[in-house]
Image: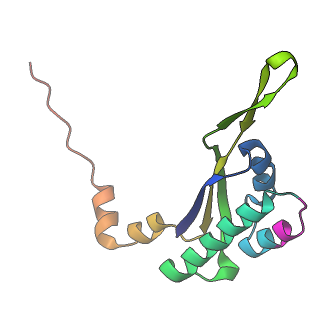
Amino acid sequence: MKTSATAKFVGTSARKTGLVAALIRGRRALDAQVVLANTDKRATVPVGKVLTSAIANAENNHGAKVADLIVESVLIGPGPTLKRSRPRAKGSASAIRKRSSHITVVVTDGKSAAKLVSSTPEVAAAKTKKPAKKEEAK
């Protein structure tokens, strides 16, 4: 069962957060938490919080076991940019862009909902029936 958690408007740029996200994609959830705990990047804190939240969602909402969870995907998107300025020489100013990002972590226990639904006999029988061909009008 897929379960996700999202954090929006995180005060770190998507480019920097994406470097941290690449470290945990495809790993087991417990291993990903260990990797984040031992990585010296500022973005590991919000990514770790979202991962912890996704794990808790899977446990509470779907009854999944933590040992079975795998990080299926970590999606990092750009958030809004705050535009500020810095004074420069001769009365001019230069732009400062304070970027933010949105983080989504999807964890799965390996059992997909499609497999569970297609295992029922009624659904399997419905899939094997071929649709009737439309007769052409002459």
In the figure, 44 relative to 89: above or below? below
In the figure, 17 relative to 93: above or below? below
Q: Which residue is most to the left?
A: 138
Q: Nearer the viewer, residue 136 or 76?
A: 76
Q: Which residue is most to the front?
A: 91
Specify whether 110 is left or right of 112: right
Specify whether 128 is left or right of 58: left
Give the mark count.
0
State yes or no: residue 37 in magenta: yes
Q: Is residue 98 in view?
A: yes
Q: Nearer the viewer, residue 118 or 1?
A: 1
Residue found at x 78% / y 56%: 43
Residue found at x 79% / y 24%: 94
Q: Tell me how the rendering is colored.
A: rainbow
Query: Can you tell which quarter of the image residue 84 is in?
Result: top right
Q: Position of residue 128 (x, y in %)?
A: 32, 57
Residue found at x 60% / y 41%: 80
Query: Can you tell which quarter of the image residue 137 is in?
Result: top left
In the figure, 121 relative to 126: above or below? below
Q: Position of residue 28 (x, y in %)?
A: 74, 70
For the C terminus, give its image quadrant: top left
Q: Nearer the viewer, residue 100 or 33?
A: 100
Q: Which residues are magenta?
A: 34-40
State yes or no: residue 15 in magenta: no
Residue found at x 49% / y 78%: 62
Q: Position of residue 8 (x, y in %)?
A: 59, 54
Q: Position of residue 117 (x, y in %)?
A: 39, 68
Query: Can you tell which quarter of the image residue 29 is in?
Result: bottom right
Q: Is residue 109 in view?
A: no
